[in-house]
Each structure stands twice: as C-alpha cells, then as structure tokens.
Image (spheres, rainbow, N blue to C red):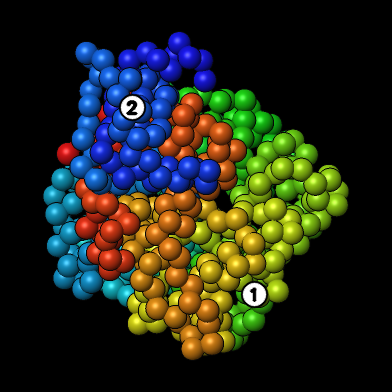
C-alpha cells in the first residue's frame, strides 16, 4: 500500500474491538482504520493511533465482535422486496389467523383488486374453498414460503381461465376435473400472468426498504439467484440514485425454453461491473422442492413411491446449454434439492470440463438438500461450490415439516449433510434463500450451531461459529470471484464492516441470536447505527 495514503488521517477508527478478520493469515485484531471506501489498517490499538486526526470518527468497539460485512450467497432480492409490500403469512398457523391477516390487507384495497399473500405454510389451507370462505369477492393468490406452491380462490382461477381446464399438469384437480386451488411450479403461471404488475415506483420504494433492512441485519452484499437485464437495470438505477446500500451480484436465469441465442443477454449483463451492481453468472433450475413432490431423486419418495419426477432439464439439454455458458466465461449456478438433481448436475459439470477444458469456473450447486455419499467428493474433484442455506435444515426431526416423511428414514442421514460435504473437501458458501426464510444471518447460524443428528447413523452435521462467519464472508466473496476485494477485514479491501452487540465467540451456541448488529458500514459509509 502507498505510504502517503497509509499515513493520511482515517475517516473512521474502530478501537478496542474483537476483530474477526476472516483472513486466514491474520484471523484476529483489535483495531481497524477506514479511509474513503477502503480499509487502510488492521492491527492493534497502539498501531491505529497514527491514523487518528481531528476529523476522524473514533468508535469504541467495547470488546464486541467486528467482522467483514456479511454476504448472503443465495437470495431473491428484487422479488422479495416486492413481496414485502403484500400480506405476510408466516405467522398464520390457523385459518382464523389467515383470515385476520388477509382481511386487514383487503381493507387497504379497492373493490376487485388482487389480494396477494406470501410466506404461507403448507399446512393451513389446501383448497380454493378455504380461501373463498375468507374472501370471495376479491381474487386471492397466496404462495408458500419456498415459492414452489401457491393457492388461488375461485375468482382468481376463473379470471385465469383454469378453473375447469388448462394450465398444465401442475394445476391440481379434483375427481370432477375442477381446479382444487393448489398450484405447483409452472401451474402458478396462468394466475401470475394476469396479476397486474406493481409500478416501477412501488418496486423502487420496496427495494430501498429491503436494502435498509438488510443493513440492519449486517448484510452488505447479496447474490441474487434469479434475474435478467431488466432486473439488473432496476438495481443499477437504485445505485445511481444512492438508494442501494447492498452490493448485488445478478445472474441471468436460463429457463427451459431458452436457446443459445438468449445467452447474449447474460453476456451483456456480464459487462456491467459497477461498485454495487454486477453481472457475470447464469442460474438454472434442475428440480423443485421436496415439499411439493417436485425434487428429482435417486430413489422414490418415501411417502408416495408412485410419484415420478423428471428433471427440469434433461442431461443432454443441460449439458448443451451449460457448456455454451461456460464457453462464454459465465459462472453457472444450479438449483438442486434432490439427490438425483445434484448427481445429474455434477455429471453435467464433468461433461462440460471434457468439452471446454478445465478452468477456474467456480460453478455452483444451490441448496444440495440431499446428496448421496459417493457424490460428495466430486465437488472438490470438479471445483464445484456447494451453496447451502442453513435454515433449510431442521433443528430436529420434529421440526422437519412435511419433508421428513417425503425423504423417509433412509435419506435422513444425507439431509443437509454439511459436515460430510466439508469433510469430502467441498467449498461451501452460505445464504438464506429469502423470502423462503428470514434473511437474518443469526437465525441461520443458530441452526448450524445447534441442530441435532437426524439419524443415529449420521454424522454430527453441525458447523462451528468460525466456519459460519467465514462462510458468510470470505467464502461467499470467493463464490462471486471477489475474494480479493471484500469478505475480509484486510488492508486494501472494501470497507464493508459490521460491529455486533456482543463478542460472538463468547456467547453460548444457544444464545447466538442475542447478538445483533449495532453498526453497519458499506463502502466506507455508516448505513445503519442503533
């Protein structure tokens, strides 16, 4: 680092802190100095004194933990921000609670406007009649937390023209051929297509709000796991207006109907490399989720063996499209919940290496909810990153929901097998998958530190606090090719930092959620302070 820059007075100095740097060569420090958008010193309280001038803001860390800003490596920011403006149903455990939330939301609307709900559980409503009993005169559409299943009331189904027929096989029908109201995967499309889109002003307002909420949780960067050029330009406009305090990595979603010419849009996105908004990746879906019987598995579902699931992309189709992406230098991320999806994707990545040659591609598999033991070493062999979402793992079998029965006892020991993956040499990165679950990193770290063994035969799959923090910082930065710029408290790196209310490493594992960010910095500016 240039000596003239290093000796200038810092804008911020944090002293007397328990700094966890995520830098494997220098894991701990006590003080940090920031000048402009960069960290200019990491060391002890004595060494930082020379960076203090008349205008330097000095922050007493009070022996609390300071880390690099957290990077959520799997999130749906723009769609999630938009859904934050609708009726939130995660706390509705009964039909009466559903009714209360939806009717309060309906009171804000004009007659016949759509009532939209999100983050519903799978076990409260199951039919259009359930929704009709709550509200019949408005069209109603509510989706689950994982966004792979939704329900619509009769009016919504009639407006979409699918009450009696149409919409595909994932529009669930009763014995008379009428839609029950349950919509899975692409069965949701007919209804979604007729819901009036939110205004640009609404989306921008919601995006600003979501950005602020992320900062409060200590999140300074995200990998947005769906997108296109329009989405990227929405983020870029928010960056230009100073309304975006979260760095966003935006992949292009490759849909099953896409062809190689559609990848021009992904290439154009890759050329955008701003301070806060970047392209350079693509996202595929290989399957759905266990809860809706759409995960692609090696063995049949335990509770419904007759259910047959095909992958969204055949092996040939995936290999052809993914090889084209790889040849263009694009990073690839693939949604895989079932062990069959994981295996087919690894097979595809191996085929791509044979076609194009091996490079530092850092291709990824998202979720890896179930993985057979023989496939785990292949992550290291192929250089594939396992992108995991900690709160998708149940704390114990009683918290596993309907997935517990879907998997069956024979697969419990391979369910969210993080320790086994890590022992096999897989590179991990961590995220939330918001809006499926909360984006608060502490809720996810709690699960990683405290989960029980799901099977007597299984390995203890817990992670350590150090592994979690590194997974949310340095390793998440690596997963987006930014490990030389952020994800560590290190001289010359971007000044994205979080100061917590506690010393994280002194808390008992069951108390980790007591820790909250009290101060968040992005690009050398304090964006949240309690």
Q: Secondary structure at mark 2?
A: helix
Rendered location of residue 498, percent (x, y): 32, 40
Image position, residue 183 (x, y; %):
45, 65
Instruction: Name above or below for residue 271 compared with residue 27.
Output: above
Structural distance between the alpha carbons of marks 1 and 2: 50 Å
Disc assigned to residue 48? 2
- Name the residue nearer the viewer: 304 or 328: 328
Labels 1 and 2: the sequence-earlier one: 2
Is residue 527 among the parts visible in the rendering? Answer: no
Residue 359 appears in the rendering: yes
Q: Residue 250, image x and y in percent?
A: 52, 37
Q: Give me the residue at 71% from left, 63% from top.
A: 378
**Residue at numbered disc 1:** 372
Question: At 64% from the left edge and 62% from the top edge, which residue is drawn?
Answer: 425
Q: Residue furthest front?
A: 46
Task: Locate residue 136 relative to residue 261 in the image: left or right.
Answer: left
Where residue 483 sits in the image (x, y, percent)?
55, 38
Q: Which mark is residue 476?
A: none
Q: Quadrant of residue 150?
A: bottom left
């Amino acid at each position: 680092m240039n000596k003239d820059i290093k000796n200038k007075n810092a804008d911020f100095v944090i002293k007397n802190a328990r700094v966890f740097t995520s830098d494997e060569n220098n894991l701990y420090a006590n003080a940090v100095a920031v000048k402009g958008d960069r960290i200019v010193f990491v060391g002890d309280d004595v060494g930082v004194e020379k960076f203090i001038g008349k205008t330097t803001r000095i922050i007493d860390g009070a022996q609390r933990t300071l880390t690099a800003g957290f990077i959520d490596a799997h999130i749906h920011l723009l769609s999630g921000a938009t859904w934050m403006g609708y009726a939130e149903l995660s706390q509705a455990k009964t039909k009466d609670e559903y009714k209360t939330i939806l009717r309060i939301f309906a009171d804000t609307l004009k007659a016949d406007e759509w009532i939209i709900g999100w983050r519903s559980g799978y076990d409260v409503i199951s039919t259009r009649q359930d929704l009709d009993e709550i509200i019949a005169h408005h069209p109603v559409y509510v989706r689950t937390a994982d966004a792979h299943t939704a329900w619509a009331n009769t009016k919504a189904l009639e407006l979409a023209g699918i009450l009696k027929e149409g919409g595909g096989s994932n529009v669930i029908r009763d014995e008379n051929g009428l839609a029950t109201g349950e919509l899975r995967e692409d069965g949701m499309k007919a209804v979604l297509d007729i819901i009036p889109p939110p205004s640009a002003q609404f989306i921008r307002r919601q995006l600003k709000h979501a950005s602020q909420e992320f900062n409060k949780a200590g999140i300074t960067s995200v990998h947005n796991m769906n997108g296109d050029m329009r989405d990227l330009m929405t983020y870029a406009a928010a960056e230009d207006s100073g309304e975006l305090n979260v760095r966003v990595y935006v992949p292009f979603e490759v849909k099953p109907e896409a062809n190689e010419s559609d990848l021009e849009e992904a290439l154009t996105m890759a050329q955008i490399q701003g301070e806060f908004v970047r392209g350079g990746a693509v996202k595929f879906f290989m399957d759905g989720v266990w809860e809706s019987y759409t995960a692609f598995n090696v063995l049949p579902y335990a509770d419904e063996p007759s259910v047959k699931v095909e992958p969204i992309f055949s092996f040939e189709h995936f290999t052809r499209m993914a090889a084209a992406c790889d040849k263009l230098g694009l990073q690839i991320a693939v949604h895989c919940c079932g062990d069959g999806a994981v295996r087919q994707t690894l097979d595809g990545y191996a085929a791509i290496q044979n076609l194009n040659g091996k490079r530092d591609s850092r291709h990824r598999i998202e979720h890896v909810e179930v993985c057979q033991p023989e496939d785990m070493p292949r992550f290291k062999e192929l250089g594939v990153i396992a992108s995991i979402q900690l709160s998708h793992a149940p704390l114990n079998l009683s918290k596993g929901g309907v997935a517990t029965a879907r998997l069956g006892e024979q697969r419990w020991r391979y369910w969210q097998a993080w320790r086994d993956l890590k022992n096999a040499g897989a590179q991990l990165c961590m995220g939330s998958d918001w809006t499926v679950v909360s984006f608060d990193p502490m809720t996810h770290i709690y699960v990683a530190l405290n989960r029980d063994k799901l099977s007597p035969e299984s390995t203890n799959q817990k992670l350590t606090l150090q592994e979690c923090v590194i997974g949310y910082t340095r390793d998440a930065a690596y997963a987006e090719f930014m490990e030389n710029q952020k994800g560590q408290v290190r001289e010359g790196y971007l000044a994205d930092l979080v100061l917590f209310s506690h010393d994280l490493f002194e808390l008992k594992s069951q108390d980790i959620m007591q820790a909250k960010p009290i101060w968040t910095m992005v690009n050398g500016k304090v964006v949240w302070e309690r």
